[in-house]
Image (cartoon, rainbow, N blue to C red):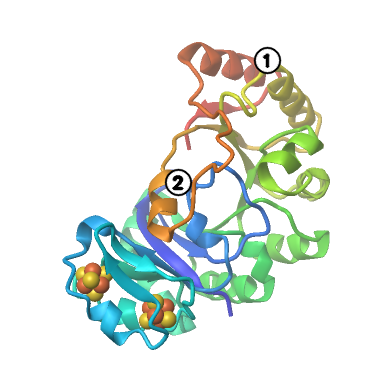
Amino acid sequence: MALIFDIKRFAINDGPGIRTTLFMKGCPLRCVWCHNPEGFDEKPVKMYTKKKCIGCQTCVEVCPQKNLVLTTEGIKDLGHCTACGKCTNECPTLALEMAGKEWKMEDLMAEVEKERQVMEESGGGVTICGGEPLMHTDYLCEVLNELSKRGFHRTVDTTLFASPEKVKKVAERCELFLVDLKLMDSAKHRFYTQVGNEQILSNIRLLSEIGHPFWIRIPFIAGVNADEENLTASAEFLSTLPTKPQMVNLLVYHDVGIGKHARLGTTYNPDNIKMEAPSEEMQQKALDIMQAHGLNTKIGG
Ligand code: SF4
Ligand code: SF4
């Protein structure tokens, strides 16, 4: 069973209509700009928000590993955490929280059912993202089957870094894929994400060949992939597929990952790679390139 590390309600950028989005833990990529680094690891991870901490030291007392100490900088982790959850269960202010928990199917569905009316009225549904949900295909399919029985529209937000067999299995169980297309040059893709893009491009082609609806999401980052060469290569690839994406979303860079890394005790962009939001002019240029290739494109989700 995969762990879920967040449930976002009233999501308006995760597919059509208003949606409930489930975030599954575990991802084979390590994108430098990732907004959800708490989803990298398949196991639960502890997060600490210093401004919520009142210094009561309950966590220090309950930790069986003697792993926590209170310093002038707040609670410090000595590196022996087993993720047992005792400190996060006892912290009175939620300064310490555990990202990632197992959900029984009936409990997960009860959460999703809470927003049924707004989803139905808006033409929305449920989106499953991560992390990378295809890392846990069996569990993902169980959730998708259950959502189908209940009549929810199902979207899977994925890198498509998975075997074609897994992609086909999931395709039989969802109405829409949201697929990241980060960079067309595989060496650059590997530099920024730790994996090459061959399998991803091949799986996008596969979805296109079987005619499964998909949207493409391009994280749009000046200094990384907002140059004319990459945008033109992306547009040429997408526009010559047997079935084009229904939509191309250019998702303008922002650095929300900084705060998450701070709460995890890890460092955002440790090599100081230059990343910026593209200027208005670059955004317009990108739209022009995509639209000139006949791609239905917009800035944002
Ligand atoms: S999760 Fe468990 S082992 Fe880790 S710091 Fe908290 S109490 Fe200690
Ligand atoms: S239990 Fe929570 S509030 Fe108290 S010291 Fe630990 S982190 Fe801070």
Element under disc 2: helix
Left or right of residue 54, residue 162 in this image: right
- Measuring from the top left, give residue 257's x and y in whole percent: 45, 46
**Residue found 66% across the figure and 53% down from its top:** 29
Q: Please state the quadrant of the image where ligand 2 appears.
A: bottom left
Residue 228 shows in this picture: yes
Residue 71 sits in which quadrant? bottom left
- Measuring from the top left, give residue 193's x and y in whole percent: 67, 45
**Residue 182 sits above or below residue 17 on the image:** above
**Residue found 75% across the figure and 43% down from its top:** 190
Left or right of residue 144, residue 28 in this image: right
State whether label 1 is within 8 Å of ligand 1.
no
Task: Please tell me which residue lies in front, 203 or 270.
Answer: 270
**Residue 124 sits above or below residue 80 on the image:** above
Residue 85 shows in this picture: no
**Residue 236 sits above or below residue 85 on the image:** above
Measure the C-alpha gap from mark 1 to mark 2.
33 Å
Query: How many other residues sit within 10 Å of disc 2, few (<14), some (14-19) or many (≥20)?
Result: some
User: Residue tagged by mark 2?
Assistant: 257
Q: Which tag is nearer the camera, tag 1 or tag 2?
A: 2
Inspect the image, locate mark 2, and give the three-letter code of the amino acid beneath it: Gly
**Res. 292 mark:** 1
Q: Which quarter of the figure is the N terminus placed in? A: bottom right
Element under disc 1: helix
